[in-house]
């Protein structure tokens, strides 16, 4: 049985995968595309919060919110000036893949390749007897919980959220009722990119920051939505939880071979249930 610390690390990873996967599914539900540059918005969020805290002296919680707003604006610009100008799902996919190299190259030119580290914003640990948890990791858990609750309220208790759900399920019928799917697509793109950026922001004090840090979170969040079911918000959360714990526990036992075993397990899950755990419907 792995020690408690391994399970805590798995929970931390799950939080990031859930947040990113949720944003990816939200974009997919309205735009019908997978944003392959999602991990690069995660990376940009980490860099923005790093400079907001270290250079501008903005408090960490406010920096996270400002980062989310800034990257949401960037995501909307990508939607208007890149995605909207490309015809066809295949070509949109190629365009967003191209954005991976664009953002990584731009970050490399601007920030350099060396790792940067944001010192622990919340120092100290919570001692629970047989194990302890740093306050910084607890902040990740609280952040994820707040984000998930906020998204639930937005999607189920606000006009915009209900319009998003309606457009995701029946876009033609939603447009007949006066819902602007185009306007919603901009809002959803902004929210999805903001979630990725804030995930990168909250992890900035824990993991090294560099231009290529978005690759693994992107792959893991993609696997999470495939496991949960493409198009399912519930599946994104459950898939992120499963993947985070599996990755941490398997790495504890197998170290460098953990990724091989993890991908094999994902393949087995898809062979048994190709549509994912929650199918393709928006939950």
Image: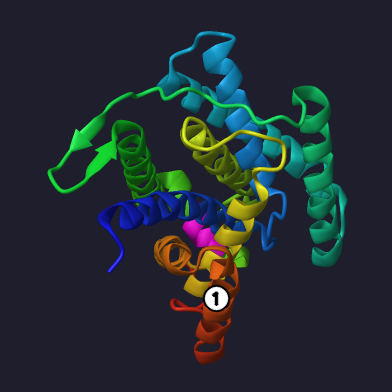
- Mainly helix, strand or loop, the magenta region? helix
Q: Position of residue 64 (x, y in %)?
A: 48, 27
Q: Is residue 208 visible?
A: yes
- Which residue sits at x=58%, y=82%? 267
Tell me the magenta residue range. Answer: 164-169
Way the structure is coloured: rainbow
On the rendered image, what quadrant is the N terminus found in? Answer: bottom left
Q: Is residue 230 visible?
A: no
Residue 253 is left or right of residue 81, and the answer is left
Residue tagged 1:
261
Q: Position of residue 61 (x, y in %)?
A: 41, 23
Q: Position of residue 106 (x, y in %)?
A: 82, 32
The one of 80 and 129 positioned closer to us in this rendering:
129
On the rendered image, what quadrant is the C terminus found in? Answer: bottom left
The one of 132 and 178 positioned closer to us in this rendering:
132
The one of 123 and 39 positioned closer to us in this rendering:
123
Residue 188 is left or right of residue 36, and the answer is left
- Figure check: 15 above or below 111: below
- Which residue sits at x=79%, y=60%? 93
Residue 167 on the magenta segment: yes
What is the crowding at mark 1: few (fewer than 14 residues within 10 Å), some, or many (at least 20)?
some
- Figure check: 261 above or below 163: below
Q: Quadrant of residue 29?
A: bottom right
Q: Which element carries disc 1, helix, strand or loop?
A: helix
- Which residue sits at x=34%, y=35%? 139
- Figure check: 277 above or below 89: below
Q: Quadrant of residue 79?
A: top right
Residue 153 on the magenta segment: no
């Amino acid at each position: 049985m792995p020690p408690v610390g391994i399970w805590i690390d798995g929970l931390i990873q799950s939080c990031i995968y859930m947040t990113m996967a949720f944003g990816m599914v939200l974009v997919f539900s309205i735009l019908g595309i997978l944003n392959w540059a999602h991990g690069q918005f995660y990376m940009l969020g980490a860099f923005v919060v790093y400079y907001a805290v270290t250079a501008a002296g903005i408090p960490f919680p406010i920096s996270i919110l400002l980062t989310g707003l800034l990257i949401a604006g960037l995501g909307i610009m990508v939607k208007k000036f890149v995605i909207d100008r490309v015809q066809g799902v295949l070509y949109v996919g190629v365009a967003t893949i191209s954005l991976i190299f664009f953002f990584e190259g731009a970050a490399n030119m601007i920030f350099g390749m060396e790792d940067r580290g944001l010192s622990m914003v919340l120092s100290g640990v919570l001692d629970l007897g047989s194990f302890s948890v740093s306050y910084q990791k607890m902040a990740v858990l609280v952040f994820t919980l707040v984000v998930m609750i906020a998204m639930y309220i937005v999607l189920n208790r606000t006009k915009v959220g209900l319009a998003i759900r309606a457009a995701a399920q029946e876009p033609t019928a939603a447009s007949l009722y006066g819902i602007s799917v185009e306007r919603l697509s901009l809002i959803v793109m902004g929210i999805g990119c903001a979630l990725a950026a804030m995930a990168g922001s909250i992890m900035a004090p824990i993991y090294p920051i560099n231009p290529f840090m978005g690759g693994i979170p992107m792959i893991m969040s993609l696997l999470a939505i495939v496991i949960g079911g493409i198009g399912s918000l519930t599946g994104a959360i459950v898939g992120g939880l499963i993947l985070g714990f599996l990755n941490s526990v398997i790495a504890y036992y197998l170290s460098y071979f953990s990724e091989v075993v993890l991908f094999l397990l994902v393949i087995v899950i898809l062979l048994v249930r190709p549509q994912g755990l929650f199918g393709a419907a928006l939950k």
